[in-house]
Amino acid sequence: NKTGADLVIATDPDCDRLGVAVRSRTGEMKLISGNQIGSLLLWYRVKKFFELGVLNQENASHAVTIKTFVTTDLQKVIPERYGVRCIETLTGFKYFGAKLEKYERALPPEIRKKYRELSEEEKRAAQLKHSSFYVFGSEESYGYSGADFVRDKDGNAGALMFCEVAAYAKSRGQTVDQLLDEIFAEFGYFAEKNASLYFEGAQGAKQIERLLESYASAPPNEMLGSKVASIRNFETDTIRDVEGDEIPKQKMSIFELADGTRIAVRGSGTEPKIKYYLFAQRRPGKSRFGSAELEKIKAEVNARLEDIWSWLQTDVEQRLGR
């Protein structure tokens, strides 16, 4: 506030994750979530590649974005609107890297031999002609990637990309949160809530295992009056991405409700807890959301997430017989 800065950007110590606070339309600094940062970066990159003529209707099917299953579906809706493929993976940029290696291997042998020596423009042309051009990748836990030459989340590149988005917003007389609302108005309002339940000690480990098994053997039929329309069990089901590649097994379940709400549940690999990822959305009809309408929808969708989280906590108590 002393300097009147528009942005505060921070990375973690090894600089692979990026967090951002922005000067909002009210003049206050506002934290934006990892899902929102990624959505802004994705929208801007796809839009700019089309404006610059790098992507067009003829080659868009050879472009690809990547997100994890527990990242906002706004990052699926945006590229699909442009005819760009969206790949979903398990959490971890090693899965992103595996896709990028696959796309490199799909190039003709004569190009692969000199791939590392090519300029970015030459690589892009080869990918769009023979394989897949990687536009952007993101995970909700503040990890972003915008190029094939760094096959991991990259806080440095993320900072540069976000500064460009912020400069674009300012050039139009907007704050970053106003630009984000413009995206919501066009593509729909998408909200997310991440939460965890901790179970300490040996007894806690048994409770975690019991809960995860119960979600697989006795999944809920409905939540707060909305029927469970589909269930994906990543440990037992054979699940493939849109390219036909099989997703590795993991103890995770995703419940899709009839009203579009989505809940992912998985154990933590490093801490004694179960992680819950909640997603809700409201899509516009034939026209964009108006500003007053969008504010009303935000309140309704956010309240829905809180209600679902309360329901899930009560359901956990019942599953554990407390």
Image: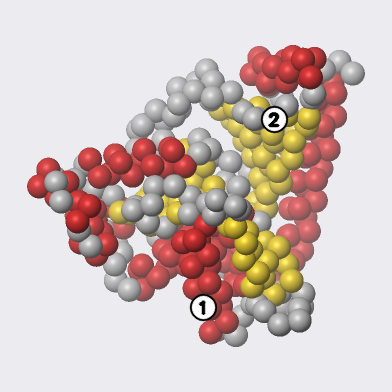
Q: Position of residue 269 (x, y in %)?
A: 62, 28
Q: Nearer the viewer, mark 1 or mark 2?
A: 2
Relative horizontal placement of residue 151, taking residue 190 as reference (left or right): left
**If the image is split into quadrants, where does the N terminus sit?**
bottom right
Along the line of sight, the residue nearer the viewer: 238 or 151:
151
Label of residue 239 in the image: none
**Label 1, on which residue?**
168
Q: Residue at x 30, y 54 (%)?
A: 133
Along the line of sight, the residue nearer the viewer: 128 or 196:
196
In the rendered image, the vertical position of residue 228 relative to residue 147, given as above or below: above
Q: Amino acid at mark 1?
A: Tyr
Element class at badge 2: loop
In the rendered image, the vertical position of residue 294 relative to residue 72, given as above or below: below
Please report whichever mark, 1 or 2, sits nearer to the chain's N-terminal start: 1
Tell me the quarter of the picture where residue 69 sits. Answer: top right
Q: Residue at x 37, y 56 (%)?
A: 147
Q: Residue at x 79, y 25 (%)?
A: 199
Tell me the quarter of the picture where residue 26 sits. Answer: bottom right
Between the residue at mark 1 and the residue at mark 2, the CA separation in whole angstroms equals 40 Å
Q: Position of residue 186 (x, y in %)?
A: 56, 66
**Outermost residue toward the right?**
322
Is the C-beta separation of discs 1 and 2 under 8 Å?
Answer: no
**Outermost residue toward the front?**
13
**Label 2, on which residue?**
271
Relative horizontal placement of residue 194, taking residue 39 as reference (left or right): right
**If the image is split into quadrants, where does the C terminus sit?**
top right
Q: Residue at x 41, y 63 (%)?
A: 46
Q: Amino acid at mark 2?
A: Glu
